[in-house]
Image (cartoon, rainbow, N blue to C red):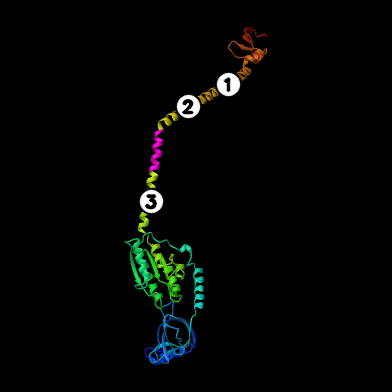
Amino acid sequence: MPRLDTSPEQPVPVRVVAQKIAEWINRLGEVWIEGQIAQLTRRPGMATQFLVLRDTDANISLNVTCARAVLAEDIGEGSRVVLRARPDFYLERGTLSLRATDIRRVGLGELLARLEQLKRLLAAEGLFAADRKRPLPFLPRRIGLITGRASAAERDIVENARRRFAGVTFQVENVATQGPSAVNEVVAAVERLDADNAVDVIVIARGGGSIEDLLPFSNETLIRAVAAARTPLVSAIGHETDSPLLDLVADLAASTPTDAARRIVPDVADERSRLADLRERARQSIHQRLRGDSALMAGLPERMREAVRSRLAGEARDVDALRERGRRRARTVVEAAAADLGHVRARIRSLSPQSTLDRGYAVVQRADGVVVLDPDDATGPLRIRVARGEFEASRDSRG
């Protein structure tokens, strides 16, 4: 389609733009569309019926017209359908609508198959992983409750919670829990409560219903909103046999709204009984300890005397052992020293000049005490020392 050539000086009329839009939309041809009927107007006696088709995962809807024969009687508001339609752009009103030629209700088997496919997709992303589950507070300051207005689920949770703990407070968000607007209202309520720091836990509750009635609680948009919430969230949808995908992403899945009240609020009577039991057990433990200590103190003097005697006897044995070890050590040291002295004496004896004299040698000295080493030096009076004494001699210069 050629682009319009326009400018502030050369604008085109509204009808030209409308015609271009209509031409582009008409080129789309017939398409198959899936959605949920948010509004249905059946006009008796008229050939054309009017309905609003809504996307269940987004706040988007389109007007649809169809022939009376195309719209089956079992199709009503809230029904999920697939339809074949041609987009029409009405030039006079500048509006877009769909003209349906075939409308088919989505069967239960197909719905369950799609839920199973969505379940596998979200599980693969880790949204149902156990390590993402957060523990609930022991005693929440305020409970955010998302449920239908004046519903049995709201009454069950509030009454049972206050029966267990009278001081519990609620911030109730009344929303549609089925129908075309349910998903958007529940998601908005979750975001409001999650942004409130005073809310410690959020509960989404609804009574039982058919699979179609509980479809909003398996909606992908709602599941992702719950996964993104920072506040711990409890799912309390339907009865024990109902298992929407919300149960898998929630931090705790209660089997019923009444079970949710028991799980999020402690029972004051039970806690008091538990405290009394702990107090009694502590008292018995203290008494038993005191009795044991009393028995221990009663025999303490005799045990102390026996301990002192035993300690003294042990110390005496240790002293005797040390004394004997000292004696042995002293003997060993003295004997080693005597042996070393004998060896030193023998070495001195072997190196002494007396030992040399004993072998028949003599030491000749002059009168001035100089030892004669050369025969030419032996002149004048001489003193000769032998092994058993010494004597004098003389040698004249003639030899």
Mark 2 Cα-neighbour bin, 10 Å: few <14, some 14–19, many ≥20: few
Q: Mark 1 points at which residue?
A: 335
Considering only order in the chain, which callout, 1 or 2, is on the residue closer to the N terminus? 2
- Name the foreground residue: 223 vs 280: 280
Find residue 366 and report its horizontal and vertical position in percent.
61, 11
Considering only order in the chain, which callout, 3 or 1, is on the residue closer to the N terminus? 3
Viewer-nearest of labels 1 and 3?
Answer: 3
Vertical position of residue 285 compared to residue 110: above or below:
above
- Name the foreground residue: 203 vs 149: 149
User: Label 2's element?
Assistant: helix
Provide the residue span drawn in magenta.
Answer: 287-299
Q: Do the residues labelled 2 and 1 touch (CB within 8 Å)?
A: no
Where the C terminus falls, by quadrant? top right
> What is the residue that sits farthest to the left in this orientation?
167
Residue 188's image quarter?
bottom left
**Dot 3 amino acid type:** Asp
**In the displayed structure image, the side of residue 349 where residue 117 appears, left or right:** left
Q: In the rendered image, is residue 4 in sight?
A: no
Mark 3 Cα-neighbour bin, 10 Å: few <14, some 14–19, many ≥20: few
User: Label 1's element?
Assistant: helix
Indicate which disc residue 277 carries. Answer: 3
